[in-house]
Image (cartoon, rainbow, N blue to C red):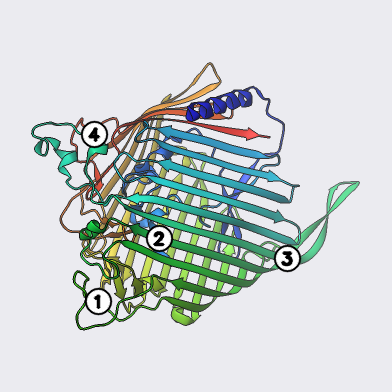
């Protein structure tokens, strides 16, 4: 009843928005902030019709996505070049698709206040899936802006004991003055998810008749799971503020014969960036009998109550010579120093090192892991940029570790782009490269919990990636290709323990995006080929395809419609397993996943500033094979009817 009232209210608001006349205003725009010195990169405002419905399908995060199944739950991108590196607080990595970050945060300049409100829902009472998102931005004046956002996911899941309840909120603001600039945000998240450990037997999906005396159908909620009382909670925040004070001179410009204006021309800037992050992970399971799911139990036979906390405070001071303050300044240059403090607190190690342990407890494999630890780290670096120019732009950033565990660390990242005309359109070619020689995160070396304890001395991981991108908008062609060599790669083995591969692994990846259009008919395709020289170290599907066939047309000249069918498909490979106690993905060598097309039928519509959709996700379930697993023992969601509504309020 409450959901019906809420949807009705949104529909009424949508009708009001449709009837309102658009005010005459300057165009809105958005940007992202680039670390460590706050350079701005143009971005987009998400009000497009295309594929609006797909954000409600968990597996649609990527054309090859290993997921536990539910919206807002753990998953790993299996397109290697799209995967983020391991973080200092690795529990966040499994939730990366749902969490805000510096790389995804957007600032808006909307001239007048803007509110983007969307609500998506699907399923019935037992497997409801709801998501409410809102983004607000408003300008105090032409220089200052404030913003806020909320993202709430509540999903019971299609299978038992996999519910999620995620709340993410944030505040942001910016000031772009002649001399002083500030960009800041505060994001907070509280991610709560039940862990079912996967279903007890894959035959409940692939061939239920074998387990049910010939009965060939079973309700997803009736399938037994390995765990019934376990859950993970990840709570965290990030406060990021970038300040820049510019020095320069005032230049008088003549508008016409009788009018002149003074314009401030910045020459250099002094920059201070503060970045505070915090994280807290809790894993609980009070069902004592379920400890048999794990090979080892170290601290408590009656249940698990693991806690790991982390915070870091980073300060970066920099000075830069700005680009284009005169005709000879063809590029910008900067130098900076970064200091970071990291703090870790873990579950207390209560085991006495005795010759014999209490019955049932596993032998303790390592020395005592300290309950708390701090790291003091220092880097120096430089940046070279050219952001303006019709033919050539480039960016290169390098930093070198001087103090703490990062001594000898080296991180170099750069790209160069050129544009030229072809067939009346602009073609862009970009080359990029990256070299990293980095120390292992603290928690990969030292970790203690009820079921997993390790004390490692991993060496630095070295990686070198080089590649290029080709963009031809006129033909709808986008091609990327690259190769990476990784030495001393850290991964989780089949025992769910972190290990370091002593040799090298080479990854090659190439992705072609090709959009085809014939009148109202459209066929968009994304094909990724990737190969790993060591599939037992970095397992990857060799071929991943996303194909989207749809009709695009108008009804009564006012209603935009996208009517189509899309499909995710990737080839079979030894997909990673998932360990709920640590929220990590581990290598296994027994079960193949993939080779299954996951298809959705949908209608996306847009009327004025209102978008809405109707979707029948996974409509092809049972039409071919039933082997719809993206990870061992974690089936994808069965078919589900879903709807959604989004309104762009211009206040």
Please give the residue where the numbered disc 3 appears in the rendered image: 246
- The residue indicated by pointer 1 is 364
Label tally: 4
Q: Which dot marks residue 282?
A: 2
| Mark 1 residue crowding within 10 angstroms, few (<14) / some (14–19) / many (20+) | some
Q: Secondary structure at mark 3?
A: strand
Q: In terms of depth relative to the viewer, which is nearer, 60 or 381?
A: 60
- Secondary element type, mark 4: loop
**Closer to the N terminus: mark 4 or mark 3?**
4
For the C terminus, give its image quadrant.
Answer: top right
Q: Is residue 412 at all visible to an observer of this figure?
A: yes
CB under 8 Å between callouts 4 and 3? no
The residue carrying mark 4 is 219
Label 3 or label 1, whichever comes before in sequence order: 3
Q: Is residue 532 left or right of residue 307?
A: left
Which of the two discs, 3 and 2, labels the residue nearer the N terminus? 3
Q: Callout 2: helix, strand or loop?
A: strand
């Amino acid at each position: 009843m409450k959901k019906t009232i809420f949807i009705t209210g949104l529909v009424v608001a949508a009708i009001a928005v449709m009837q309102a006349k658009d005010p005459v205003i300057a165009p809105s725009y958005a940007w992202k902030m680039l670390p460590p010195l706050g350079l701005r990169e143009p971005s987009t405002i998400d009000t497009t019709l295309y594929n609006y419905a797909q954000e409600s399908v968990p597996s649609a995060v990527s054309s090859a996505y290993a997921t536990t199944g539910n919206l807002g739950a753990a998953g790993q991108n299996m397109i290697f070049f799209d995967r983020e590196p391991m973080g200092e607080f690795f529990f966040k990595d499994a939730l990366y698709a749902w969490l805000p970050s510096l790389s995804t945060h957007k600032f808006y300049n909307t001239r007048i206040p803007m509110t983007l409100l969307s609500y998506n829902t699907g399923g019935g009472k037992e497997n409801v899936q709801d998501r409410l998102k809102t983004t607000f931005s408003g300008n105090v004046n032409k220089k200052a802006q404030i913003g806020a956002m909320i993202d709430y996911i509540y999903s019971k899941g299609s299978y038992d004991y996999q519910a999620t309840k995620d709340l993410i909120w944030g505040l942001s603001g910016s000031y772009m003055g002649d001399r002083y600039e500030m960009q800041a945000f505060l994001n907070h998240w509280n991610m709560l998810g039940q862990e079912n450990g996967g279903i007890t037997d894959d035959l409940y999906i692939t061939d239920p008749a074998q387990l049910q005396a010939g009965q060939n159908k079973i309700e997803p909620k009736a399938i037994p799971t390995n765990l019934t009382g376990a859950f993970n909670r990840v709570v965290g925040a990030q406060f990021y503020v970038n300040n820049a004070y510019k020095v320069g001179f005032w230049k008088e410009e003549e508008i016409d014969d009788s009018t002149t204006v003074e314009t401030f021309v910045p020459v250099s800037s002094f920059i201070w960036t503060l970045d505070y992050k915090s994280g807290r992970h809790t894993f609980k399971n009070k069902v004592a009998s379920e400890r048999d799911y794990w090979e080892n139990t170290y601290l408590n036979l009656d249940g698990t109550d693991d806690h790991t906390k982390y915070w870091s405070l980073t300060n970066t001071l920099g000075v830069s010579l700005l680009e284009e303050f005169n005709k000879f300044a063809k590029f910008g240059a900067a130098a900076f120093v970064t200091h970071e403090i990291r703090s870790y607190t873990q579950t207390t190690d209560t085991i006495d090192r005795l010759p014999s342990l209490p019955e049932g407890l596993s032998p303790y494999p390592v020395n005592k892991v300290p309950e708390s630890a701090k790291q003091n780290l220092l880097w120096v670096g430089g940046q070279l940029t050219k952001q303006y120019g019709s033919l050539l732009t480039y960016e290169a950033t390098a930093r070198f570790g001087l103090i703490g565990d990062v001594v000898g660390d080296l991180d170099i990242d750069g790209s160069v782009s050129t544009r030229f005309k072809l067939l009346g359109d602009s073609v862009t070619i970009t080359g990029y490269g990256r070299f990293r020689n980095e120390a292992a995160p603290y928690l990969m070396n030292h970790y203690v919990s009820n079921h997993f304890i390790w004390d490692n001395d991993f060496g630095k991981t070295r990686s070198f990636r080089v590649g290029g991108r080709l963009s031809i908008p006129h033909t709808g062609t986008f091609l990327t290709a690259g190769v990476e060599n990784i030495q001393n790669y850290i991964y989780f083995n089949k025992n769910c323990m972190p290990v370091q591969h002593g040799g090298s692994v080479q990854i090659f990846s190439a992705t072609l995006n090709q959009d085809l259009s014939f009148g109202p008919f459209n066929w968009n395709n994304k094909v990724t080929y990737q190969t790993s020289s060591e599939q037992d170290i970095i397992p990857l599907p060799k071929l991943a395809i996303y194909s989207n066939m749809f009709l695009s047309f108008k009804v009564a000249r006012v209603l935009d419609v996208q009517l189509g069918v899309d499909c995710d498909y990737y080839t079979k490979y030894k997909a990673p397993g998932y360990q709920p106690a640590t929220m990590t993905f581990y290598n296994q060598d027994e079960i193949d996943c993939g080779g299954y097309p996951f298809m959705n039928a949908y209608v996306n519509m847009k009327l004025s500033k209102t978008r809405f959709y109707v979707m029948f996700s996974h409509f092809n379930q049972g039409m071919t094979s039933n082997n719809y697993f993206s990870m061992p023992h974690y089936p994808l969601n069965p078919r589900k009817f879903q709807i959604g509504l989004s309104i762009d309020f211009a206040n």
